[in-house]
Amino acid sequence: MKNIFISGGGNAEVSKKFDQLYHNILQEKKRILYIPRAFYPERYPSCLERIDKVFPKSLGYTVDILDENVPFHTNELLHTYDGIYIGWGNTFRLLKLLKETWLIQTIQMFYEQGKPIYGGSAGAIILWKEIHTSPDINIEKLDFISSLWLNYFQGYAIFCHYQEKYDREIYDYIRNYEIPIIALPEWVGVYTHNDTYYVWGNDSAFIFTVQWKQAFNEELLLY
């Protein structure tokens, strides 16, 4: 069962409308496992400051950072938390940490159990097929196989923070990697329940192939 929320990025105010969908699907206890792995630990306080605006304690949310250095039992995390929130930052750092630790097993377990997973910007990109749509500078260059990732969305890659000025760059990517793209402006998100994909926000989501670009405002049709 798929229960995934993908945000095009932006600050807490910009993504507020889409974030509310994730709020609505969480169970009553509202306990969230937060993975800010795209940043270094010294940035975590600012990450928590941002996340508190998305999930305020005053509304009953509890947000805990997942620490890969602490021994854990995946089933324990699954029963304790209602959902996972994967944060923004450097996509290549996030991918490296997921591959080198047990964090990926945690994400996969939540995915298989149908618990809601939210990916914002870098956290969104790693849930799709390939991560070179990210603008981050990758010091350690990845070959194509190394950059392939979770592929929860039928072979598409995602382009976050989309603006029309990036169209040429997107077409160049598609010609190079032969992977179609879903492009999301910062105020737009896509969520999926099982195999149906929906667009939510103040603008369209866009599908790019090597031949065309198409806008979607409600249901997103993947080909």
Image (tube, helix red, strand yellow):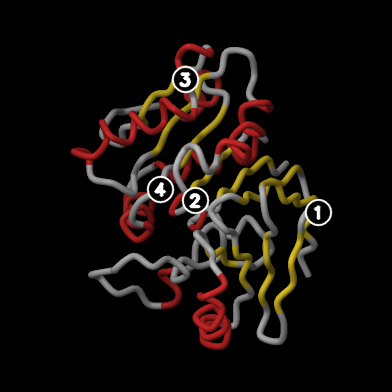
Is 136 displayed left or right of 144 in the figure?
left
Location of the N terminus by quadrant is top right
Numbered mark located on residue 56 in the image: 3
Q: Which residue is mark 2?
A: 9
Q: Which residue corresponds to the image point at 74% horizontal and 66% vertical from the top-left?
A: 215
What separation in Å lies between label 1 and label 4 (alpha carbons)? 25 Å
Q: Which residue is mark 4?
A: 88
Q: Amino acid at mark 4?
A: Trp
Is 6 displayed left or right of 55 in the figure?
right
Q: Secondary structure at mark 2?
A: loop
What separation in Å lies between label 2 and label 1 (alpha carbons)? 20 Å
Q: Residues within 10 Å of mark 2 (few under 14, many from 20)?
A: many
Q: Is residue 212 above or below residue 73?
A: below
Q: Amino acid at mark 2?
A: Gly
Q: Amino acid at mark 1?
A: Glu
What separation in Å lies between label 2 and label 4 (alpha carbons)? 8 Å
Question: How far across and down, in percent of the image, does residue 176 sit?
Answer: 51, 87
Q: Amino acid at mark 3?
A: Pro
Q: Which residue is mark 1?
A: 219
Disc 2 + disc 4, Cβ < 8 Å: yes
Q: Secondary structure at mark 3?
A: loop
